[in-house]
Image (cartoon, rainbow, N blue to C red):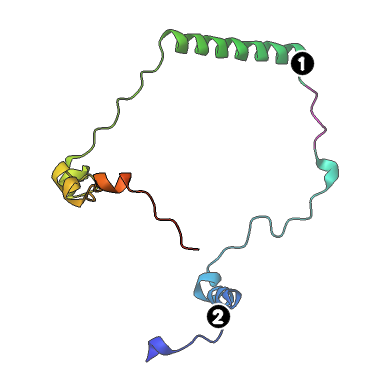
Amino acid sequence: MGGCAAPESINPVDWWHNLEGGAIADARPPPPNADAPYPKLSTVPAKPAPPDPAALQKAANALLGDRGAAQYAASVQPIPSLPPPVPHPAATPAAAGDDSQPNAALQAANAPPPAAPPAAGAAAAPAAAPAA
C-alpha cells in the first residue's frame, strides 16, 4: 500500500527543501571568506597598457603563413577518401527475407491480363444513329 500513497506536495521546490539540511548540512564547512570584509573597488588594479601594434601584426602574419603552409601541404598530399562501407551480410534484403524485389515469375503471375484486340467486324460496322 505504500506505493499508492501520494506525497504531501508535488512541487520540486518542496522536495529540494526537504532534502537540504539534516545530517549532510551539519558537516558542511562554511564558504571561504564568509567572514571577510566586503571588497573595496579602489583595490582593483589599473587597466593594462594596450599591446604593441607591431607585435600584433607580426603575430597575425605568422598565423597567415602557417595557414598558407597547411593549405599547400593539404593540396600536395590530400587526405585519402574512405572506401565505401561494406554492408553486413545479414543486412542485405535477400538475407533478411525482404521481398521488396520480387522475381520475374512472381511479377508475371501478378501482371494484369492483356487487353483483347477488337473484332474485325466491329471496326467496319457503322455506328447506329440515335433515334429522334
Tell me which corner region of the image, top left, top right, bottom left or bottom right, holds residue 29. Answer: bottom right
Residue 14 percent location from the top left of the image: 59, 78
Q: Residue at x 62, y 62 (%)?
A: 30
Which numbered disc flags the more N-terminal residue, 2 or 1?
Answer: 2
Question: Where residue 91 sits in the image (x, y, percent)?
Answer: 22, 44
Residue 36 at x, y = what percent?
Answer: 73, 56
Q: Which image quarter: residue 13?
A: bottom right
Residue in the image at 83% along x and 45% along y:
41
Whether residue 41 is visible: yes
The one of 41 and 74 positioned closer to us in this rendering: 74
Q: Establish if 80 lies above or below 13.
A: above
Q: Tag 1: residue type?
A: Asp
At mark 1, the secondary structure is loop
How packed mark 2 is, by other alpha carbons closer than 10 Å (few <14, some 14-19, many 20 or more), is few
In terms of secondary structure, what is the magenta stretch mainly?
A: loop
Read off the magenta span. 45-50
In the image, is residue 26 part of the stretch drawn in magenta? no
Judge left or right: residue 116 versus residue 129: left
The answer to whether one can see residue 90 in this image is no
